[in-house]
Image: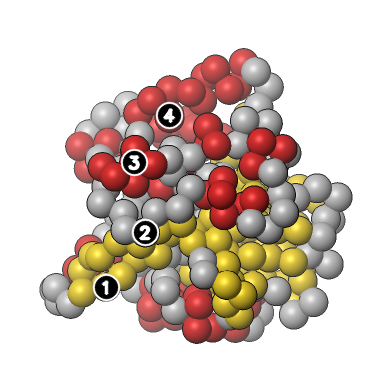
């Protein structure tokens, strides 16, 4: 049985029209930024890497705390994190990879192909990337630190990644067996609970059909909506158990 912690490393104001498909409201909305730590298995497993201070400053994050510092508050040395499952390669999930210098990064092959392929250069996608962080995929691969995954894959018994796509070409979500049942970390397959609960996609997509099918996958894996952990929703702190500032115990 695993324990899961959501670790908040920053926040930013946005508006509803940015995150809900065809939404016209400019109502204010707060985005929380997380990485997730899974303990209780053979090795600690990090989900996503967050970003570094430079990205946080450039992108206007408030109350930034290094994801490495958040991980260490749970007693795991950032320099010794052995495995990081990378949901996708947007700046707020991948640009922090340098904070975890021993990690092997598990990424969908289709995600790497997208960001190194012909479409990524268009502004609509490029704006979501940290180009040097994407460039390091090559050197990390040559250092045997990239594990390319194709579809569904078991990391340890009861801990799996599942390709869903939609928001990005190779977006993967994570399912984890815990004392409260199988928890699903959606990352950006559902930024907010409103996405997955009302089947309202985000505006940032590579495939709308994949995003909608991804909601089905999330519900099917979780079984119970109470075991879904949305990727950027401040509501996570209300639905699960805050332990101290920035640390929420999921299970
Ligand atoms: Zn994100």
| Residue at image location 61% in from the left, 75% down from the top | 243
Question: In the figure, is residue 215 to the left or right of 118?
Answer: right
Q: Nearer the viewer, residue 167 or 64?
A: 64
Q: Secondary structure at mark 1?
A: strand
Residue topped by disc 4: 134
| Residue at image location 41% in from the left, 34% down from the top | 114
Query: Looking at the image, is mark 4 or mark 3 nearer the viewer?
Result: 3
Label 2 and label 4: CA atoms lie apart by 25 Å
2 or 4: tag closer to the N-terminus: 2
Residue topped by disc 3: 55
1 or 4: tag closer to the N-terminus: 1
Label 2 and label 3: CA atoms lie apart by 13 Å
- On residue 63, the disc is 2
Residue topped by disc 1: 29
Q: Nearer the viewer, residue 132 or 167?
A: 132
Answer with the quarter of the image where residue 31 lies.
bottom left
Answer with the quarter of the image where residue 167 lies.
bottom left
């Amino acid at each position: 049985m695993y324990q899961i912690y959501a670790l908040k490393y920053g926040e930013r104001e946005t508006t509803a029209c940015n995150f809900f498909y065809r939404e016209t409201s400019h109502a204010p909305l707060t985005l929380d930024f997380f990485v997730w730590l899974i303990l209780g298995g053979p090795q600690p497993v990090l989900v996503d890497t967050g970003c570094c201070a430079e990205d946080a400053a450039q992108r206007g994050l408030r109350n930034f705390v290094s994801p490495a510092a958040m991980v260490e508050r749970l007693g795991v040395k950032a320099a010794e994190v052995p495995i990081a499952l990378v949901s996708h390669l947007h700046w707020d999930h991948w640009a922090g990879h340098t904070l975890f210098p021993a990690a092997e990064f598990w990424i969908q092959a289709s995600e790497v192909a997208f960001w190194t392929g012909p479409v990524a250069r268009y502004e609509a996608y490029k704006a979501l990337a940290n180009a040097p962080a994407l460039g390091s995929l090559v050197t990390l691969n040559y250092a045997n630190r990239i594990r390319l995954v194709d579809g569904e894959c078991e990391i340890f018994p009861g801990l799996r990644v599942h390709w869903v796509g939609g928001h990005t070409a190779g977006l993967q979500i994570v399912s984890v067996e815990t004392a409260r049942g199988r928890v699903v970390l959606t990352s950006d397959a559902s930024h907010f609970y409103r996405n997955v609960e009302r089947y309202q996609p985000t505006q940032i997509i590579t495939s709308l059909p994949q995003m909608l099918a991804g909601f089905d996958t999330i519900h099917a894996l979780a079984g119970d909506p109470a075991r879904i952990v949305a990727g950027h929703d401040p509501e996570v702190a209300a639905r699960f158990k805050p332990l101290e500032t920035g640390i929420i115990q999921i299970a």
